[in-house]
Amino acid sequence: MLLKDKVALITGSASGIGKEIAVEYARQGAKVVIADLALEAAKATAEEIVKEGGTAMAVAMNVTDETQVDKGVADAVNTYGGLDIMISNAGIQIISPVAELSLENWRKMLAIHLDGAFLTTRAAMKAMIKQGRGGSIIYMGSVHSHLASPLKAPYVTAKHGLLGLAKTVAKEGAKDKIRTNVICPGFVRTPLVEKQIPEQAKEFGISEEDVIKKIMLKDTVDGEFTTTQDVAQTAVFLAAFPTNALTGQSVVVSHGWHMQ
Ligand code: NAD
């Protein structure tokens, strides 16, 4: 068990990548806080983990809401006696050409991905500094933290922004043994991606099969999707890493799509 008795709060962990990380962390011995906008789904995930013999609780958290973020982190600390790992993972996708993108959707995307990362980081850092035992902060970036695709301007902008936040927090957090890294997955078949396949087919006027083959997996080494388990294993490795040697970095998990 690589994360025995560590306390981990994961945002957006009622579904997809975040859920798989939560389940895997619990298997590795962590006490897991499922923080999500979708409270019922978060409770169901926590119940699944408890049934498997793990320790988990659900908290209602909209990551764009300062009060809810601070309260969720405080609940985690009060219930499990501290916070060792915070994963800023909650996210959505909105597909649109820049020329047709509304200011409302631009702001919504930056609020969830960047305000959310900032608010959860600030709350986690305060808790980690106070408890004095360090910690690991992990951001869910994307291959789109390093390159761009059409129709995804706010997503690409926000995912690039996470690299800047992670590097800054790595510098500020080092003296308190707070490490921070960004995981950059390729395409993973979660609800977020399933929704995009027909949307992109419509925007580009091609079949859904071609969206997968000619857009999503075109530049991988083997035409394979990345899996939630691939990302979860990376999140275990980064959280369990013992020293500041691995901080301020981004790890691309993508079947070779964008080699750094
Ligand atoms: P998903 O849709 O399966 O899960 C996202 C979760 O975030 C949901 O449970 C949702 O309720 C929650 N959420 C949404 N808005 C929220 C908010 N304001 N506050 C709290 N929770 C909120 O998506 P996923 O594919 O698992 O994506 C998770 C993260 O991984 C996102 O940041 C996404 O950008 C990133 N990512 C996904 C892929 C992919 O291919 N699926 C690739 C690279 C990066």
Image: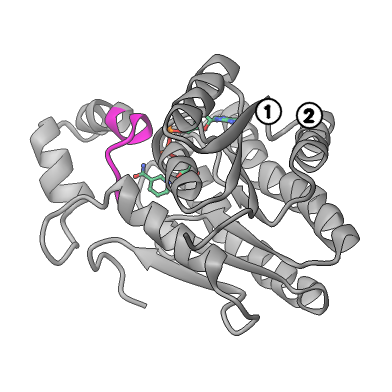
Q: Residue furthest bottom?
A: 245
Look at the image and say whether residue 191 sits in the magenta stretch.
Answer: yes
Q: Give the secondary structure at mark 1.
A: loop
What residue is disc 2 on?
Answer: 68
Any atom of ligand 1 within 8 Å of the CB at mark 2? no
- The C terminus - image quarter: bottom left
Asked if disc 1 is less than 8 Å from ligand 1, the answer is: yes
Q: How is the image coloured?
A: one colour
Residue 231, above or below 98 = below
Q: Nearer the viewer, residue 174 or 118?
A: 174
Which percent across, then down, holds residue 14? 49, 29
Q: Residue at x 51, y 67 (%)?
A: 238
Q: Which mark is residue 62?
A: 1
**Residue 105 x/y as whole percent:** 57, 29
State left or right for residue 238 relative to residue 115: left
Amino acid on which disc 2 is placed: Gln
**Image vertical order of residue 20 relative to residue 85, above or below:** above
Answer yes or no: do the residues labelled 2 and 1 have beta carbons within 8 Å?
yes
Amino acid tagged 1: Asn
Q: Residue at x 38, y 58 (%)?
A: 233
